[in-house]
Structures are given as structure tokens and as C-alpha cells.
Image (cartoon, rainbow, N blue to C red):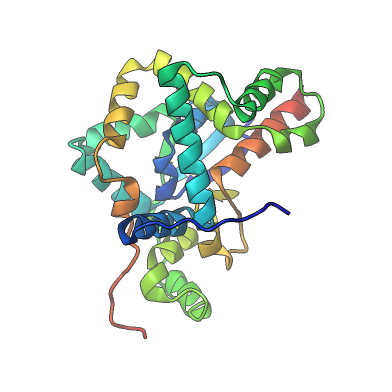
Amino acid sequence: MASKTTVAVDQKLRKKIKKLSALLDIPQSAVIEKAITNFEKELISNKNLPKTNAENDSNDKMNNFSKIDNIDSIENIDVSKILEEATKKIWKKFPELEKKQKMLQKGPQTIDDFLINDWITGLED
Amino acid sequence: MVFSKIALDSNVFRNYDFINYLTLYSSDFEIYLPTIVQLEVGYFYRMKNLNWKKFKADLDKFRCKFINCENFKPSEIIENAYRNRKELPFRHHFRDYMIATECEDVIHRLITYNTQHFTWVKKFEIITPENFVKEHLKSKKKKL
């Protein structure tokens, strides 16, 4: 079993983690893990630091995808790499879409801010 | 041949890599957008200064169709909401009842990150974008 530890975060950050955890329906620890993975990737791409073992593994999985002949092994594939590849191809085909999609991601408002989470009707509770 | 008839929940649009994946393989899918998703995502675009025409142009890239208004059946939405009111109260899950009921006779799979909001659905599969991609890849490998 993996060892666990406690970290102290301030109230504001705790609320952010809690919100993301609820939105993505994943444990709060997974939110932190994803954030750190993204931060690590960003840091590596900016500083040209050596890649982590996890990244090398993941790249190997991607490179090996075309060689997969066992359908069950697809279960272990890194889907995010496949999706990123799709984006590269689509942005090449539709350059205006790259601009638009980057614009949609910009700023504090995300699609989740526009979901009707609470339909206040007064009919229940 | 179409791999699957699918509908998208609004939260799927947070992952534009997945939307691009659908665009890349659009000939494999028949994609539908439920009414409330049209409104939520369309309004999100509007708030980012992208009008309806620009939103529609993006949807057209993956041949996304709007669910026909004939599929909007208020009485069935209400019945589904009433049947599941204890686990998924109406005021918090109205949109989920509306989306799933509208899709009932149209699709094979609903793609969403909130799979637990649709546990009551019997007529089609509820699946996350990542698992859907895996299913699609498996079907492509089988064909090879």
C-alpha cells in the first residue's frame, strides 16, 4: 500500500481543490496529483530538464500504440497522449480552431461555470 | 460504418483534445447535442465573445447534430425525475434528467464526466471521454 502524508493548505486553496474534486468526480488527492503532473510537464518543457520515468513510460506507450496487436493492452494506454496527438493534427488542419480553442481556455471562466448546477425551483426540500 | 451514436454533455467541452479527437474521427460517429447542452456551451462561447455562428461552425467540424425537438418530452422528464428523486433531487439534477430523457431513443452512449448523475439510465451507456476513446480504439484494432 502506498504511504500517505498530510499537507497543510490554506482555506482558499482547500476550497479550490474541493471544487475541482467535485467537478471532475475524482478524489482531492487526484486533483493534487494532476496539478503536480501538469506543473512538472510545464517545468520540463520550459527548462529542458530531463524527462521523468513516468513521462518516458508514457511516451513509450504512445510510440508503441501502432504496434499493439492485443486489444486488451489498450486498457493500459495513455489516452491523454492520443488526444493530444488528435489536437496537433486538427490544429494543423484548421489553424483558426487553435486560436479559438486557446481563447476559450483563457481567463478564469470555464465551461463548468456555465453548467446549471442548481435549478432553484422551490419545489423540493 | 458508424461506430456509435453518441451525445455529449456540456462538461466534455472542457477537454478540447477530446473534441478534436471526435473531429479527427468524425466519420466513425453520429454525434448529437442535447438542448440544454446547446444552451450551456453556446452561452459559454458567447461569454468568450464567440457568437452562435462561430459555435455552430465548431460543431459542424465534427458533424454534430442538434437533438430534434420532437425528443423533448416533458412528461417523461418529470417521471424520470420523480422516480429517482431520493438519490438525485430534481433541483440539483434537472439538467441531467432533461439531457438523458431527450437522448433515450436516439443514442447508444452519453459521454460525460458526471457518470454518477446518470446511474438511473437504462436505455444507453454512460461513459467518460477517456473510456469512450479506449472503446473506439479497440473497435479500430478489431477491424485491422
Which residue is drawn at the image coordinates 64% and 23% (left, top)? A56
Frontmost residue, A76 versus B27: A76
Which residue is drawn at the image coordinates 42% and 34% (left, top)? B16
Tell me the quadrant of the picture where the C terminus of chain B can be found. top right
Tell me the quadrant of the picture where the N terminus of chain B can be found. top right
Q: Position of residue A51 (x, y in %)?
A: 57, 21
Farthest-out residue, right = A70
Q: Is residue A105 above or below residue A3?
A: above
Q: Position of residue B24 (x, y in %)?
A: 51, 24
B22 relative to A15 in the view: left or right: right
A73 relative to B81 in the view: left or right: right
Q: Position of residue B107 (x, y in %)?
A: 55, 49
Q: Position of residue A39 (x, y in %)?
A: 44, 34
Q: Total marks drawn?
A: 0
Frontmost residue, B102 versus A103: A103
A5 relative to B99 in the view: left or right: right
Whether residue B48 is visible here, answered yes or no, is: yes
Farthest-out residue, left = B49
Q: Is residue B74 above or below residue B109?
A: below
Q: Is residue B91 above or below residue B5?
A: below
Frontmost residue, B27 versus A54: A54
